Amino acid sequence: MNTSRRILLAGMAGLAVVPTAVAAAPIPAIGGATVAEERFARMIAAAHAPDVTCARRAELYAEAHWPDYVAAARAVLDARV
């Protein structure tokens, strides 16, 4: 699976749980995020970048905004178990 498809699927998974995750945890926890949660949050953030067609801009957006997506990443990772 190529990177852009993986980012797109992660973004779709993040969109599916964002409303419930935001209601459950309105304040993202940056310090308490595990490595898996941080990586998945960065992937979701990259998928939600304004210009997802440019990989560098998506990376920069993900670097700046990944803490906003920690709650969604936790919800997706918890749903897998």
Image (spheres, rainbow, N blue to C red):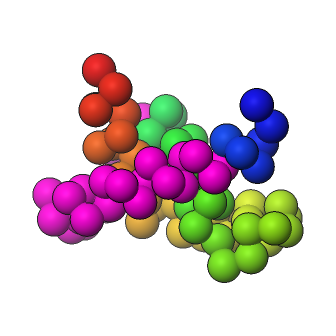
The quadrant of the rendering that contains the C terminus is: top left
Q: Is residue 15 left or right of residue 40?
A: left
- Outermost residue to the top: 81
Q: Is residue 73 above or below residue 19?
A: above
Q: Is residue 66 left or right of residue 25?
A: right
Q: Main secondary structure of the magenta part?
A: helix
- Tell whether position 18 is magenta: yes
Q: Is residue 35 left or right of residue 27?
A: right
Q: Identify the residue at image location x=16%, y=65%.
A: 23
Q: Identify the residue at image location x=43%, y=54%.
A: 14
Residue 3 appears in the picture as rendered: yes
- Tell whether position 50 is magenta: no
- Outermost residue to the bottom: 50
Residue 15: quadrant of the picture: bottom left
- Outermost residue to the left: 24
Residue 60: quadrant of the picture: bottom right
The quadrant of the rendering that contains the N terminus is: top right
Percent across and percent down for residue 66 are 52, 60
Q: Is residue 29 left or right of residue 56?
A: left
Near-viewer residue (15 or 64): 15
